[in-house]
Amino acid sequence: MEKLKESKNPVKEVEESSDLVVPEQLKTILADPEIPEDKKEAIIRLVVGVSVGESFSGPIPPPKILKGYNEAIENGAERVVAMAEKQSSHRIQLEDYAVREELKQSRIGQIFGFVLGLVGLLLATTLALLGHEAIAGIFGTTTIIGLVTVFVLGRKSLQKDSSGK
């Protein structure tokens, strides 16, 4: 296909080639004697250009495409690479910020959990000292069970997130 893009007589190459898979509709069009040779060549170049279209994956195009940017725009390749570097740096900064914020929220949650647990247990102790043992037992038990549940479930959800399940 690449040879057809650069060929001086692509019509002849299509007709003579045995390794090219040419659709029947295209063969019918090329066989029509009323269509001028230059029109046939334009059709082939268009079809080949569409079917051989180049693509790439990643932040920076391959050198061949970068060269095309330099031909189209002054310092085009340098500008494309600079844009990719800037985007990469921006993405790294965003990820760093997200991780720091997540750690900060986790720390704040632990502090609040500790304070609430401490207040609950102090309240249960105070109730027990004032002679309300049943209420103190319920309050202390629910506080401890609640905290253990939150921390255990929190750990399990973190393990699921990190393992991807």
Image: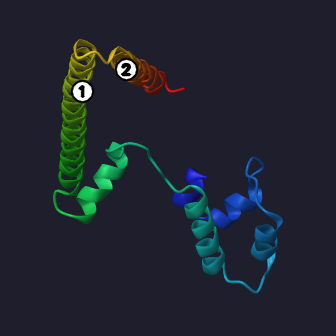
Q: Nearer the viewer, residue 67 or 103?
A: 103
Let me know if residue 7 appears in the view.
no
Find the residue positioned furthest to the bottom: 34
Q: Which residue is mark 2?
A: 151
Residue at 48 percent across and 24 percent down: it is 160
Let me know if residue 67 appears in the view.
yes
Q: Name the image quarter holding the C terminus.
A: top right
Of circles 1 and 2, the one toward us is 1
Which callout, 1 or 2, points at the residue further toward the start of the chain?
1
User: Horizontal placement of 119 versus 34: left or right?
Assistant: left
Q: Which mark is residue 116?
A: 1
Determine whether 92 is above or below 115 in the image: below
Give the quadrant of residue 43. bottom right
Alpha carbons under labels 1 and 2: distance apart = 13 Å
User: Horizontal placement of 7 versus 74: left or right?
Assistant: right
Give the quadrant of residue 31. bottom right
User: What percent of the width, then of the height, locates residue 27?
Assistant: 79, 68
Question: Of helix, strand and loop, which one carries label 1?
Answer: helix
* Mark 2 crowd level (few <14, some 14–19, many ≥20, 10 Å Cα): few
Residue at 26 percent across and 17 percent down: it is 121
* Mark 1 crowd level (few <14, some 14–19, many ≥20, 10 Å Cα): some
> What number of labels is visible?
2
Three-letter amino acid code at disc 2? Phe
Q: Nearer the viewer, residue 147 or 135?
A: 135
Residue at 16 percent across and 56 percent down: it is 75
Three-letter amino acid code at disc 1? Leu
User: What percent of the width, then of the height, locates residue 12?
Assistant: 69, 63
User: What percent of the width, then of the height, locates residue 151?
Assistant: 37, 20
Question: Of helix, strand and loop, which one carries label 2?
Answer: helix
